[in-house]
Image (cartoon, helix red, strand yellow):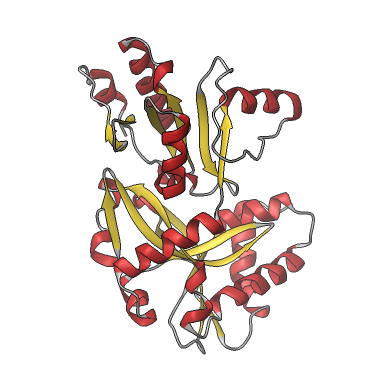
Amino acid sequence: MMTYSQFTQYVELHIREYVSEEMMVSSKTWQQKNNGVPIEGLVFKDSGALVDMPVMVYFKDLYERYCRGDASINSFLQETVNELSNGVSTKFRDSFKDRIFFRIVNAEKNHNKFFTSPCRQVGDFLVEYRLIAFKNEFGVGSMPINNEMAKNIGLNEEQLYQLSMKNTEKLFPVSFENLTTIQDSLQNTGQIPLGHEIRADKNDEWQVYTLTNKVGLNGASTILYPQVQEDLKREFPNGYYVLPSSIHEVMIVDQSFVQEPLDLFMLKEAVLSSNYQVVEPSEFLSNEVYEAKGPDFQLERTTFLNHKKEKNMER
């Protein structure tokens, strides 16, 4: 098994042996990922495409896939290029409109995207639009839609928002599971259950749930699905709290589970501790606890009287 350094050198040296003449591959380059975190990879571009849509493939993601598989490095590269060719070689707008989706990220840490990409702010979150390059058993590859790409495909921000809202729920169906069930499954089988539609188990002592999608990627975005919002209102009529674990998932806590102010501070402590000790900087979403209640169930920041610990631990 190659080391990461050996892998990146080999891929950069040999990847062009597997691509077609129309496919252009850059030298190793660095790009800012979510929250401004730099990451290295290669950029693939189809010189014959009518729409300029370069795809950056991250070395870190490739190496993780390579380590999980049992294929030779050459077979792995051939398979990777075949997958990318299907996504990068897009010739017409209608062929990829159904692959446009959205995800939410931290608005403050990604404010520069307002100048480079069509996006919108929803509370503390930034809704950004992406295009799926490939989606299979190995994972999902996507690229951000910047201003130039949006212009080339002829879609403005409102059109992207409406299209992505329709697509994302289909491409990434919701997964909802009680935290107790997840812990039991991990203990017994070592695996996380796939989850199901939104349904609260009122018999469980712990009214704490994980909300994500069935892929487990960018799953925090499910909190904006219109059907999810309706289902949460039905299952938690007295309101609920939202704990942003990362860009990949959020925790839903029944409001009746929080009886004392100390309980609320414990939720805040859980968010801060997770962000500080567990969550990767590029996957950070928010340090806040959010609350949905009242007739419209609008998601708002929960107010705390003491922010001393928060400021000490905040990223």
Residue 5 or 50: which is nearer the viewer?
A: 50
Q: Residue at x 69, y 57 (%)?
A: 137
- Residue 225 in view: no
Q: Residue at x 43, y 28 (%)?
A: 236
**x and y percent of residue 60 in the render?**
56, 54
Q: Is residue 176 above or below residue 149?
A: above
On the rendered image, what quadrant is the C terminus found in?
top left
- Counting from the top left corner in percent of width and height, residue 116 is at 28, 66
Identify which residue is drawn at 25% across, 57% down.
112
| Whole-percent x, y for residue 168 in the image | 49, 58
- Residue found at the far left of this picture: 305
Q: Position of residue 4 (x, y in %)?
A: 61, 52
The front one of 72 and 171 is 171
Quadrant assignment, res 75: bottom right
Q: Taking 140 as reference, is 273 above or below it? A: above
Number of marks present in the image shown: 0
Toward the viewer: 158 or 284? Answer: 158
**Horizontal arrangement in the rendering, residue 120 relative to residue 133 (left or right):** left
Q: Is residue 84 visible?
A: yes
